[in-house]
Amino acid sequence: MTEQQRVHPVRGDFAANAWADKETYQSMYQQSVDDPETFWGEQAKRLEWTKTPTKIKHTVFDTHNVDIRWFEDGELNACANCLDRHLDKRGDQPAIIWEGDDPDQSKTLTYRQLHEQTCQLANTFKALGVGKGDVVTLYMPMIPEAAMAMLACARIGAIHSVVFGGFSPDALAQRIVDAESKLVITADESVRGGKQVPLKDNVDAALTRKGTDVVANVLVVKRTGGEIEWHDGRDLWYHEQVDQQSADCPAEPMNAEDPLFILYTSGSTGAPKGLKHTTGGYLLHAAMTHQYVFDYQDGEVYWCSADVGWVTGHSYIVYGPLANGATTLMFEGVPSYPSHGRLGEIIDKHNVAILYTSPTAIRALMAHGDDVMDSSRRDSLRVLGSVGEPINPEAWEWFYRVIGNSTCPIVDTWWQTETGGIMITPLPGATDLKPGSATLPFFGVQPALVSNEGKILEGATDGNLVILDSWPGQARSIWKNHERFVQTYFSAYPGMYFTGDGCRRDEDGYYWITGRVDDVINVSGHRMGTAEIESSLVAHEAVAEAAVVGYPHDVKGQGIYIYVTLKDDYEPSEELRKELVQWVRKDIGPIASPDVIQWSPSLPKTRSGKIMRRILRKIAANETEGLGDTSTLADPSVVDDLIENRANR
Ligand code: WT7
């Protein structure tokens, strides 16, 4: 059978009890695109506003004037929406279930407890001089304090910038400087897979870098009690500060378009960009997708296994679930520790109904065979979700059969840091599933496929994925650089938002994301710019030139393949190879660890000197049969040499 013939139809009993069945999806979708004002005006009522918006949508995708505003005269507070408004009805319901790296450690925070501790932290921020519009950087383990810190920022109108704990001191410093962050929150160490990561040491190192003297204080959570250095006057223990504070902290009314957070992500060129997300539209999109896409039902335990350092953690561990009064599980560790059965054991231990995870995690488990799940029953599961990269049909079927006991619909959700929330996805009670397809657009989302010349393509076809009109969760700008925002997303195809992804649409109108068409690679669901890795490499004394491409990798989706041209005085060696791998890991972080290095005396270039990455990608993928047009190469023999000396056969 071909991929497209394998369909998993919606189960009737599921549809009968779901938030949306086929008819509901179709009629709501139709209204959302025909009359967005009415649709979103109505949907906005799911949030609690201190001032109800009367202006719903003001969005312009004109290259000369990209201007995106939703609910612009409304006022609300995201933290109050996630906590305060649930206190009456569900004060004693678990808000966060925390599962430690060590299976013997877990704890539960009720909505009341989370509210109280978040208020104390918000008062701590105020006492440290942090207020509305200030940026707070989080560099934290997966512990409840990370969620509290995000919510405490939201409470007082400060803007959080979460930096994933796997990034290096330099990467952290770069983000602190760009955001002009006054306060950094971290922990002494994080623990993952039984190993300690020295977060505080990394912060110390970051804060020796140029421009980081904007940071006045570092608030340190004591997670392990491991040894750390202390900078008097700058460093403060989190618990000592918070314990002194009152739990009474009124939530600051914010304009719907006030920034809620910035989050850095990689693009095809230049330094990572800080995407700016605002309050009203973002929260509405996160909450609404969390309810409909996962069919979240009151009282269920919901688990998104991402890290809060990525947008998935923002929208689907913290804001979406908490805005809906859900119980959200937060896991500190990794699926392979202490054994490969951990995921299933956590599901049984906490009665998880919904699991949202990544294709990489699934493929890593699948590689160990079906019996990796033998230590658990997983019969509490009702819905499964996948995100971050295309899921191959084989991994989809394994997820369905082995983890979900062939009973749970899988929602393959396509979206991006820039989109704020899920964009193309099945709804489990409404959409027949095709393994490998993210299926159909969510409410208010108008995808289209365009040719390289920008012509909108109809029917079953391949093309570049664009979105034709704004949706509430869309990023509004790049921090301090609106010009770059316009250039990056609205200049390739004027009047449309360009996603950077390639995509196929089949005869049923289903979307199949085929991967990035720009110089962004996706390694284990982590997004990286090849240019960033290249600039790290050329900073090494031995490297004259480097070109980085992704290549297909069984577990990671894509691996990092590097072509390196050495300076005249240097010779290739195993030692130098190891050194370069360490160099990139140290410079960017372990997530950017190179998989393959090929010594390349020269790189294929056009006569104008541009590296022909298309060819390098093919060689790395071992697709050397159809190299396409090489006539524009300055020196075609370079290619033969590279094929001859391929590094990963
Ligand atoms: C890129 C965005 C969305 C949160 C996590 C990643 C790829 C994401 C899917 C999917 C195929 C996917 C795209 C996208 N991607 N989800 N379900 N199927 N590809 O966010 O780091 O901003 O990366 O991830 O290429 O552009 P991100």
Image: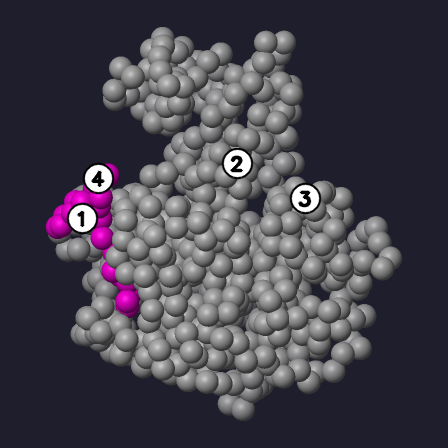
Q: Residue at x 42, y 55 (%)?
A: 418
Res 169 label: 3
Residue drawn at point x = 52 percent, y = 45 percent: 272
Tell me what residue is drawn at x 60 percent, y 67 percent.
Answer: 133
- Report crowding for label 2: few under 14, some 14 to 19, many 20 or more residues within 10 A (C-alpha): many
Q: Magenta span covers which residues? A: 441-461
In the depicted structure, whether residue 639 falls above or below residue 276: above
Q: Within 8 Å of ligand 1, the CB of disc 3?
A: no
* Residue ID at (68%, 54%): 190
Q: Residues within 10 Å of mark 4 (few under 14, many from 20)?
A: few
Q: Nearer the viewer, mark 1 or mark 3?
A: 1
Q: CA distance from mark 4 to mark 2?
A: 28 Å
Instruction: Let me know if residue 452 appears in the view.
Output: yes
10 Å crowding of disc 3: few (<14), some (14-19), many (20+) = many
Question: Please, what is the three-letter code of the amino acid marked with disc 4?
Answer: Glu
Question: Where is residue 52 shown, x and y percent of the image?
Answer: 41, 84
Q: Going from the N terminus, do you reach mark 1 or mark 3 first? A: 3
Q: Is residue 444 magenta?
A: yes
Q: Is residue 536 left or right of residue 34?
A: right
Gap between marks 3 and 4 measured at Cα: 41 Å
> Label 3 is placed on what type of residue?
Pro
Q: Which residue is mark 4?
A: 453
Residue furthest toward the bottom?
Answer: 88
Q: Earlier in the sequence, mark 2 or mark 3?
A: 3
The answer to which image quadrant residue 58 occupies is bottom left
Contact? badges 1 and 2 (CB < 8 Å): no
Residue with the mark numbered 1: 456
> 569 or 104, which is in the foreground?
569
* Marked residue nearer the N-terminal end (4 or 2): 4
Q: Which mark is residue 532?
A: 2
